[in-house]
Image: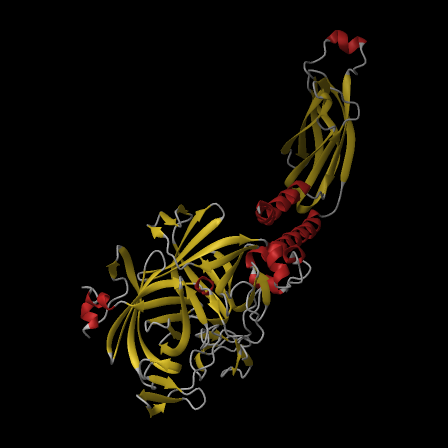
């Protein structure tokens, strides 16, 4: 059970503490978007069925993106980043924080410049994106509070074969994520959000 | 859940729709061209414009199905590299993401951004196990016009480094430098497929562009639509030239006569007649023609002799006719008449004298032949001199030169059309 949940009706962020509920504050109303994902959308990744249980929307100087929290039912945290119509599915890899190119950043010192290369499991990844983001809103169940004003630093690395590494640093500390860039179809989605004026392409949903 | 977000342009007050809400960062107003920031709930003006928005072949809001997926045009760009210009259209489907349609010289390409990146250097790259060779020198691509919405910050004048790699019909386009590099796979797509998909009315607009020079296509595809305009300008120039030539040609005076040209020897100084040039300068045309001419040529040397000064202006003409039979059957060559134009003949009165000599082909006839066979002993050539002539040769040369460039452009375009 994740500690935080956003009320879908009044946008109150609630902290679950045992059996008691604590009102933490109001989260920003999510700006409208045309994401095909919604709470309850599921993905078949190998043998695992991952279901969307929460979302955080982040904004930065040149736009915004969604991070969808997926639950595999085994307690593992998966995040599906959604930007520019493409997706990045990752899960936590705390060991990457010890990488020499990443450790100083993880410790709170300085930035990782665009173009920095790291080796992960014999794959060379390049930093393509370094940005500071603000929380624009949230919905569903989440592991951290998403009140307005929450900020984080985010660095994305890309590999030649769609490999993705994401390093984030916020008030809770650093975290490292490893996964792949992907198109929606490759994630074998189900229960996609229906949008007025659009039909879900045949064969997209599993 | 409605898929569009309605906004108002803060510059012109026009109603706009954000079609990829949540993804779009910038929007260039469809009404006034102002650049807006639509990434936040409040729409902010980035750059004000108050001129009509640029016109594109595909307009934001148009929809069409390509590769079994319905796409909505959300943005349009005009870009250039050096003197080369083309248009790019950003397509969006909330379930399939973004794609590109590129319109360059009447040809369309469908672009997909790559998630797996080609590896290599500036000369060759490897992608999905295949090598791609660089197509042209890397260059700098500039945005010259924007319309609609985009998922990144964009504005007119933006420049990006570009390189193109090719293998077969597949093009890999690399844009950007340093850390931010975007790769796009481009495949050719049939012009009819695109036009049918998006319901474009004119199947071959460029062929009709001459009749409708202000068709939207004119704005989109400058290079192509230049062709009808080039022809129109060439035709106009030719007409003006003809008018000028008729005006300059001046009054007509003529003289005619005939000469009998003997075989193998030159008969000199035969006078045809007298003509007067009554303008400071006029063209004088001398036309020679021979009716009876078989396997013979006649060399004609003209002298226009000014009566006042005795000075002579010389020219040359030839009438010729040959025939025979070879493995391809019978053939004839040559022309029984010939026109010589004297340019810039000054005011004055001139006598036209002709020196003429006839020659048989392949050899001059012998005396015996001249006497006993059907060949006449001399060849009669009619000669007519005329002032106020229009130098048609010059006019045709001008016509050729004027139409050369548009014709080359048209030929190049038609050849490109045939190629795919």
Rendered-image quadrant of the N terminus of chain B? bottom right
Image: A111 above or below B377: below
Q: Quadrant of residue B352?
A: top right
Residue A63 lies, in percent from the top left, at 39, 75
Residue A52 lies, in percent from the top left, at 41, 74
Image: B267 above or below B43: above
- Is B358 or B129 nearer to us in this picture? B129
Image: B297 above or below B175: above
Would residue B157 be seen by someone viewing this image from the given angle?
no
Image: A80 above or below B43: above
Residue B65 lies, in percent from the top left, at 59, 62
Residue drawn at the location 39% of the way across and 86% of the way down: A6
Residue most extreme to the top: B368
Compared across the picture, whether B58 is left or right of B37 comes to right
- Is A194 or B18 nearer to us in this picture? A194
Residue drawn at the location 71% of the way across and 48% of the way down: B250
- Is B160 or A4 nearer to us in this picture? A4
Would residue B35 be seen by someone viewing this image from the given angle?
yes
Q: Quadrant of residue B363?
A: top right
Residue drawn at the location 47% of the way across and 67% of the way down: A189
Q: Quadrant of residue B260?
A: top right
Residue B344 lies, in percent from the top left, at 63, 42
- Is A6 or B355 nearer to us in this picture? A6
Compared across the picture, whether A125 is left or right of A99 comes to right
Q: How many marks?
A: 0
- The chosen color scheme is secondary structure
């Amino acid at each position: 059970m994740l500690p935080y949940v956003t009320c879908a009706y009044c946008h109150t962020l609630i902290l679950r503490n045992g059996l008691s509920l604590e009102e933490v504050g109001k989260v920003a109303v999510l700006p409208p978007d045309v994401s095909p994902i919604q709470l309850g959308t599921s993905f078949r990744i190998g043998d695992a069925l991952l279901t969307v249980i929460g979302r955080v929307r982040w904004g930065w100087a040149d736009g915004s993106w969604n991070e969808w929290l997926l639950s595999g039912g085994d307690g593992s945290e998966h995040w599906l980043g959604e930007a520019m119509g493409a997706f990045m599915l990752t899960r936590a890899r705390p060991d990457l924080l010890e990488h020499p190119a990443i450790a100083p950043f993880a410790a709170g010192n300085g930035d990782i410049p665009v173009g920095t290369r790291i080796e992960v499991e014999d794959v060379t990844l390049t930093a393509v994106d370094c940005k500071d983001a603000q929380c624009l809103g949230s919905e569903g169940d989440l592991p951290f509070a998403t009140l307005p004003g929450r900020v984080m630093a985010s660095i994305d690395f890309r590999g030649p074969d769609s490999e993705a590494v994401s390093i984030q640093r916020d008030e809770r500390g650093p975290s490292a994520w490893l996964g792949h860039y992907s198109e929606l179809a490759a994630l074998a989605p189900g229960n996609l959000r229906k949008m007025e004026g659009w039909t879900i392409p045949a064969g997209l949903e599993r | 859940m409605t898929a569009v977000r309605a906004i108002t342009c803060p510059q012109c007050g026009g109603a706009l729709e954000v079609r990829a809400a949540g993804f779009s960062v910038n929007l260039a107003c469809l009404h006034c061209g102002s650049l807006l920031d639509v990434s936040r709930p409040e729409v902010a003006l980035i750059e004000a414009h108050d001129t009509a928005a640029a016109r594109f072949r595909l307009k934001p809001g148009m929809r069409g199905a390509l590769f079994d997926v319905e796409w909505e045009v959300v943005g349009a760009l005009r870009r250039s590299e050096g003197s080369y210009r083309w248009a790019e259209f950003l397509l969006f489907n909330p379930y399939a993401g973004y794609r590109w349609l590129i319109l360059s010289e009447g040809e369309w390409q469908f672009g997909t951004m790559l998630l797996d990146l080609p590896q290599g250097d500036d000369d060759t790259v490897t992608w999905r196990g295949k090598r791609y060779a660089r197509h042209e020198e890397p260059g700098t691509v500039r945005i010259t016009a924007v319309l609609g919405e985009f998922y990144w910050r964009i504005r007119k004048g933006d420049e990006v480094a570009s390189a193109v790699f090719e293998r077969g019909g597949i093009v890999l386009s690399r844009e950007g430098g340093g850390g931010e590099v975007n790769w796009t796979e481009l495949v050719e797509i049939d012009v009819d497929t695109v036009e049918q998909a998006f319901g474009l009315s004119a199947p071959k607009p460029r062929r009709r562009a001459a009749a409708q020079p202000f068709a939207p296509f004119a704005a989109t595809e400058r290079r192509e639509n230049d062709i009808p305009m080039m022809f129109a300008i060439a035709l106009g120039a030719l007409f003006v030239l003809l008018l000028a030539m008729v005006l300059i040609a001046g009054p007509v005076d003529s003289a005619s006569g005939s000469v009998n040209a003997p075989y193998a020897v030159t008969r000199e100084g035969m006078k045809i007649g007298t003509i007067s040039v009554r303008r400071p300068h006029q063209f004088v045309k001398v036309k020679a023609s021979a009716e009876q001419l078989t396997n013979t040529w006649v060399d004609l040397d003209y002298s226009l002799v000014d009566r006042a000064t005795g000075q002579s202006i010389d020219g040359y003409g030839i009438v010729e006719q040959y025939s025979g039979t070879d493995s391809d059957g019978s053939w004839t060559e040559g022309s029984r008449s010939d026109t010589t134009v004297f340019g810039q003949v000054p005011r004055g009165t001139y006598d036209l004298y002709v020196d003429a000599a006839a020659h048989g082909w392949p050899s001059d006839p012998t005396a015996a032949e001249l006497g006993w066979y059907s060949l006449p002993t001399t060849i009669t050539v009619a000669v007519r001199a005329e002032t106020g002539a229009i130098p048609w040769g010059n006019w045709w040369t001008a016509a050729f030169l004027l139409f050369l460039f548009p014709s080359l452009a048209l030929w190049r375009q038609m050849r490109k059309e045939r190629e795919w």
